[in-house]
Amino acid sequence: MPVVEEEPVVEEEPLVEEETSIKDINNKSSFFDPYDEEKKNKFKSAISKTKEGLWGKINRFFTAKNKIDISTIEELEELLISSDIGVSTTIKIIDSVEAYVEKKSYLNNDELRNILKNEIINIISVDSNDNQLLNKNQNTPYVIMFVGVNGVGKTTTIGKLANILSKEGKKVIIGAADTFRAAAIEQLSVWADRVNVPIIKQKIGSDPASVVYDTLQSAISKNVDYVLLDTAGRLHNKINLMNELLKIKNVCSKLIPNSPNELVLALDASTGQNALEQAKRFLEVIDINYLALTKLDGTAKGGVVIGICDQLNIPIKYIGVGESIDDLQLFDKKQFVESLFED
């Protein structure tokens, strides 16, 4: 029997009960649709602390300085770094600002705003497949494999995505392949019950690849549209984690060619630059093609979005914008920048 590794229990973000857990979606836009006013407003609210933290600091900086020139660029650099954008990404932005200052001697507020906006747009425009890929019709189940350490909101993201896809009329199944923590299986089971989605699980200490095998076999036999797989995030033991995740990937590809379709790393936005360092450590273990950024609504450290896109060159796909069951969105980079710089 596999050895069960003990990990400290870290609580996932709380579930906020609503009058109706599964809302009526008549007259509501699809999860896959471009942002409508409701989505925009939710997103703006989610990044309001980040906006105040970043642009609020810059506005206060201008109130004191009126203009930016060579003598004040260093202060601007410190301000950007303190907004969790990161040192190397900040240097890229500052280099562009310096180039403009050298041409004009100084910049006013509007000029700096436009330069920063354009630089951030360029940085977060990471090449990626269209988000609509998630909505692609295919004959075999679409497999989304989630990785991430305990406590970042991975289980909550899986539960919210299962709920949303189910409400879109899709058949969904969850695989509880983090078999090293009883809490992980229990939390995922609570979510599965709550959103009325089947879950495949085994006893604590079971082979995670076996859980995945059973999940995919069930998905194939029942013509399921989406498979959501939870996995362990034991970064303290990289070799075991690497072997486990590669084994799971191999099981996926053997049963369903070209799967997993998405390998998503969940990161907690509220940890700022620590999220970036965590991502780098995971990339030493396994290739990641998408990111899920959780808890964006509760932090002023959303500037890490800019640094993550710059340093990792991996697109952010899912974002947590609140605590309720529907508060998950596909990341819209254009909306992020517009909301950040909106008056």
Image: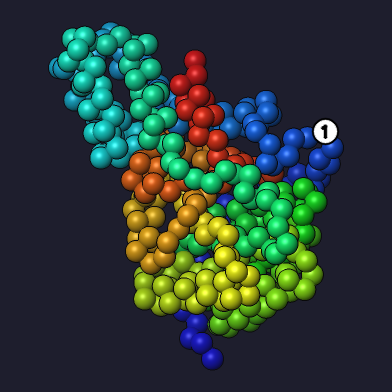
Q: Residue 170's quadrant in the figure? A: bottom right
Q: Amino acid at mark 1?
A: Asn
The residue shown at (52%, 50%) is: 292
The residue shown at (77%, 59%) is: 171
Q: Residue 210's quadrant in the figure? A: bottom right
Q: Toward the viewer: 302 or 10?
A: 302
Q: Position of residue 322 (x, y in %)?
A: 61, 41
Q: Position of residue 4 (x, y in %)?
A: 50, 82
Q: Is residue 60 visible?
A: no
| Relative to 293, residue 284 above or below | below
The residue pinned by badge 1 equals 27
Q: Is residue 214 visible?
A: yes
Density class for disc 1 (Cα within 10 Å; few <14, some 14-19, many ≥20) is few
The residue shown at (80%, 43%) is: 23
Q: Position of residue 190 (x, y in %)?
A: 70, 63
The residue shown at (71%, 53%) is: 137
At numbered mark 1, what does the secondary structure look like: helix, strand or loop?
loop
> What is the tally of numbered marks visible in this picture?
1
Q: Quadrant of the N terminus?
A: bottom right
